[in-house]
Image (cartoon, rainbow, N blue to C red):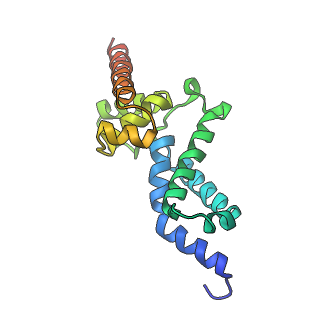
Amino acid sequence: MEGLSDRARLVSAWYAAYFPEAVRLCRLYLGSQADAEDAAQETFLKLWRKLDSIENRTGASVRAWIMKTAGNTCRDQLRKPFRRFEDRTVRPEDLGGGELPPADRELRIDLSRLPEEYRTPVKLVYGRGLTVQETATRVRVSKATISRRLQKARGIIRRSMLCTEA
């Protein structure tokens, strides 16, 4: 790292420490490893551009800023026209090859097609093991809203699975 500025060393250290976690978070949102890596890279570009304002903030950790920015970057990507709900598809390579049983594979595809407001609570509660209250706090909505979204998501997936069996 010789020859790098203090600024570059700082961002490199944060990249080494937080990039894998940012990619995991982005993969939860986007479903694709390649898209997740792109979004995480974009997150660190934003960090580089806003470094002065981040260093001057008090009370918030760098990790929290990175994870919040990574989530916002993913939401921005999901809003782009080519990523609209109806057009999103999951490719077999996005699911880790042929390792998943067909039922799990279909469930993963169904989850990727859920609207974000339902997909996020499902991933946090069932994927990360957070409680409904922890999820509500993280998403900044009421506990009842999270419960309703989980119920709605289960109904959507159940109907989808019934349609594919018919």
Q: Quadrant of residue 110?
A: top left
Residue 61 percent location from the top left of the image = 50, 63
State whether residue 139 is above or below residue 8.
Answer: above
Q: How many marks?
A: 0
On the picture, is 105 further left or further right than 113?
A: left
Judging depth in this view, the residue of 67 and 91 nearest the camera is 67
Q: Nearer the viewer, residue 164 or 117?
A: 117
Image coords of residue 126 (percent x, y) = 30, 38
Describe residue 65's horizontal placement relative to residue 80 as left or right: left
On-image quarter of the C terminus: top left
| Front residue (pair 91, 23) | 23
Q: Is residue 47 visible?
A: yes
The answer to whether residue 120 is left or right of residue 8 is left
Query: Which of the image's four quarters has the N terminus?
Result: bottom right
Residue 31 in sight from this viewpoint: no
Give the residue displayed 36% in from the left and 15% down from the top.
Answer: 159
Q: Determine whether 165 is above or below 14 in the image.
A: above
Name the one closer to the observer, 165 or 70.
Answer: 70
Query: From this viewpoint, which residue is outermost toward the bottom?
Result: 2
Residue located at (68% from left, 82% from top): 5
Which residue in the rendered view is the most extreme toward the front? 58
Point out residue 149 in the picture as x, y percentages from the top left corner: 39, 25
Look at the picture and state if 151 lies above or below 74.
above
Q: How far across and down, in percent of the image, does residue 50 sit?
A: 68, 61
The residue under the point 56% across, 64% down is 58
Residue at 47%, 30% (x, y): give it. Answer: 117
Q: Residue furthest top?
A: 166
